Image (cartoon, rainbow, N blue to C red):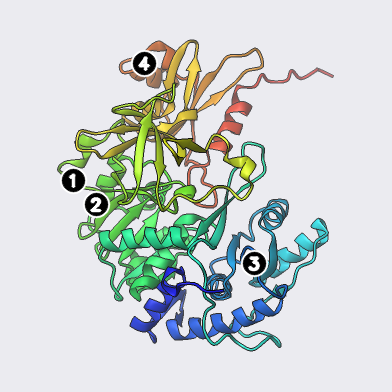
């Protein structure tokens, strides 16, 4: 096949290779992997991957699963699969085997790259799932037993070929495959390059798992500049300022939940993160208070709140935080998400799907929008035809400010009916966070067996009497929006991507609100 190498996602690594051949591309604790070494290993592994694939090329690139954590095998495995002209399917070894098996089958994975833990989990997949796939298992030094000749150079790809495939939750319980093309990523990273001044001297954090789309930001922003990516281990959060200083970190990227974690660990004091040049947050709504605290801790850093669903290629908007103006532009305490990337159109629609001037559901179309889910049946209701074009419905309720910037208000499914009241959960959360002693709050719904909807709030900080909280909220909220139950937690649960685990809180709400089973005396 023919293709334009400049369209390939791996061209960003090749750019970094030309800029920084003998500088670290990946930092894993005390081990540095240079661009030159990563390139050589990726060519070697790619040759072995191709040797395990069916001969010839069909109408779609082959799929390579990377069942590995943030290890040498995980990082170079992604690059090797791209060099082989395949679609990368990152899989998390810590996920339940049944979930990984479903994703592996949905994506049509033909060969696996694994690290030590991934190798053990692959045996579970094969035993429990009744499948058998060839496995490429490099050792800790990147060496392979046997293997085919290395590639001389990466294979060409077309802009329409999927570069990688990620999975989002499905309403039926089956993950939905999202193929992101080389063309999607080319436009995305071109936009990022124009907005941010990354250099070969930068060191990026890697806080996200490799199967999360924001992880691709870290890798290919760094590699496109000839910079380094440094794995951030969980224990680093105990003293993050020290970790960032020791590793020369200049670019931070995480979910906003990490801000609260650093605050609890004492790492968010003024000036504590003085080595940062850039700070990025995505994956959750960013609170104005958290942005201000982070900016005080990282005074030399520019701070950006970036937003976007997987289906729009990592992120699609961005807002640069300004301490003097951003707080007053926030809504319900949430920082604006900014403007949509160049080359895209967007619109807001009301509940009747008619254009809305200032507030409604956000729809977007343009070159970062994927062509649809792997299973076309999943497209219904998300990828919609309108005005002769296909648009992606984000499901997010957005407000447009006077200057055209957008503010995230919450998920549409976060708007619930409680005793006839239309309630935005984010508004309750914002109101509770404003109370003395409360650090953070998450509102979820509970549906009793007798029907209706009740609100339950989980909060962190000082333990406060529910009566005090209720009385305070009555000052700012109508009675119909008051929670039924307030539950104090030492900290909010996080999922593997360090987002607040709302599903876990919803389950806990059900346990709290369910009637106690009477005990029969003996």
Callout 1: SS: loop
Q: Is 9 or 214 nearer to us in this picture? A: 9
Q: CA distance from mark 4 to mark 1?
A: 32 Å
Q: Is residue 332 at least partly visible in the picture?
A: yes
Q: CA distance from mark 3 to mark 2?
A: 44 Å
Front disc: 3 or 1: 3
Whichever of callouts 3 and 4 sits on the residue coming sooner in the sequence is 3
Asked where in the image residue 71 lies, by quadrant, the reply is bottom right
Whichever of callouts 2 and 1 sits on the residue coming sooner in the sequence is 2
Local crowd size for mark 2, using a 10 Å CA cut-off: few (<14), some (14–19), many (≥20): many
Q: Is 507 or 385 nearer to us in this picture? A: 385
Whichever of callouts 3 and 1 sits on the residue coming sooner in the sequence is 3
* Residue 52 versus residue 205 in the image, above or below: below
Query: Mark 3 = which residue?
Result: 62
* Residue 1 versus residue 370 in the image, above or below: below
Q: How many labels, in total?
A: 4
The label number, if any, that marks residue 295 in the structure image = 2
- Residue 97, given in percent of the width and then of the height, sits at 72, 55
Whichever of callouts 4 and 2 sits on the residue coming sooner in the sequence is 2
Quarter of the figure with the N terminus: bottom right
Quarter of the figure with the C terminus: top right
Residue at the (36%, 19%) spot, across then down: 473
Callout 3: SS: loop
Query: Mark 4 = which residue?
Result: 471
Callout 3–callout 1 Cβ contact below 8 Å = no
Local crowd size for mark 1, using a 10 Å CA cut-off: few (<14), some (14–19), many (≥20): some
Local crowd size for mark 3, using a 10 Å CA cut-off: few (<14), some (14–19), many (≥20): many
Query: Mark 1 = which residue?
Result: 323
Callout 2–callout 1 Cβ contact below 8 Å = yes
Whichever of callouts 3 and 2 sits on the residue coming sooner in the sequence is 3
Whichever of callouts 4 and 1 sits on the residue coming sooner in the sequence is 1
Asked where in the image residue 270 lies, by quadrant, the reply is bottom left
């Amino acid at each position: 096949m023919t293709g334009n190498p400049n369209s390939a996602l791996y061209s960003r690594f090749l750019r970094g290779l030309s800029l920084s051949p003998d500088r670290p591309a990946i930092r894993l604790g005390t081990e540095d992997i240079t661009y030159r070494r990563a390139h050589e290993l990726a060519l070697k592994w790619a040759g072995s991957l191709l040797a395990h694939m069916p001969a010839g090329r069909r109408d779609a690139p082959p799929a390579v699963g990377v069942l590995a954590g943030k290890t040498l095998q995980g990082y170079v495995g992604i690059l090797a699969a791209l060099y082989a002209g395949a679609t990368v399917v990152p899989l998390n070894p810590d996920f339940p085997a049944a979930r990984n098996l479903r994703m592996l089958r949905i994506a049509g994975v033909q060969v696996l790259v694994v690290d030590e833990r991934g190798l053990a989990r692959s045996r579970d997949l094969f035993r429990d799932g009744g499948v058998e796939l060839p496995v490429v298992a490099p050792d800790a030094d990147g060496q392979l037993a046997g293997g085919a000749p290395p590639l001389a150079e990466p294979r060409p790809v077309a802009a329409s070929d999927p570069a990688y495939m990620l999975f989002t939750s499905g309403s039926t319980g089956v993950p939905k495959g999202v193929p992101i093309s080389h063309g999607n990523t080319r436009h995305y990273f071109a936009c990022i390059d124009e907005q941010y001044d990354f250099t070969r001297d930068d060191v990026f954090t890697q806080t996200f798992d490799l199967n999360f789309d924001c992880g691709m930001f870290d890798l290919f922003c760094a590699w496109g500049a000839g910079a380094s990516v440094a794995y951030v281990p969980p224990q680093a959060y105990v003293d993050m300022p020290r970790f960032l200083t020791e590793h020369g970190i200049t670019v931070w990227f995480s979910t906003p939940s990490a801000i609260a974690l650093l605050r609890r660990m004492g790492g968010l004091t003024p000036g504590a993160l003085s080595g940062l040049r850039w700070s990025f947050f995505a994956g959750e709504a960013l609170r104005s208070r958290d942005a201000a605290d982070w900016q005080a801790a990282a005074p030399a850093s520019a701070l950006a709140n970036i937003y976007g669903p997987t289906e729009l290629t990592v992120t699609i908007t961005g807002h640069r935080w300004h301490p003097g103006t951003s707080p007053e532009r926030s809504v319900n305490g949430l920082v604006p998400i900014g403007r949509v990337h160049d080359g895209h159109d967007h619109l807001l629609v009301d509940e009747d799907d008619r254009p809305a001037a200032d507030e409604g559901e956000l729809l977007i179309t343009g070159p970062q929008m994927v062509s649809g889910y792997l299973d076309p049946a999943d497209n219904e209701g998300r990828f919609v035809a309108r005005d002769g074009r296909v648009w992606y419905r984000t499901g997010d309720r957005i407000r447009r400010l006077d200057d055209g910037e957008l503010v995230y208000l919450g998920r549409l499914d976060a708007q619930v009916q409680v005793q006839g009241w239309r309630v935005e959960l984010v508004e309750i959360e914002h109101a509770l966070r404003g109370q003395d002693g409360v650090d953070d709050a998450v509102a979820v719904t509970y549906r009793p067996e007798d029907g209706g909807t009740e609100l339950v709030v989980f909060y962190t900080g000082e333990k406060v009497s529910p009566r005090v909280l209720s009385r305070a909220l009555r000052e700012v909220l109508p009675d119909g929006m008051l929670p039924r139950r307030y539950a104090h937690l030492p900290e909010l649960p996080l999922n593997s991507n360090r987002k607040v685990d709302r599903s876990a809180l919803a389950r806990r709400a059900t346990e709290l609100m369910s009637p106690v089973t009477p005990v029969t005396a003996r």
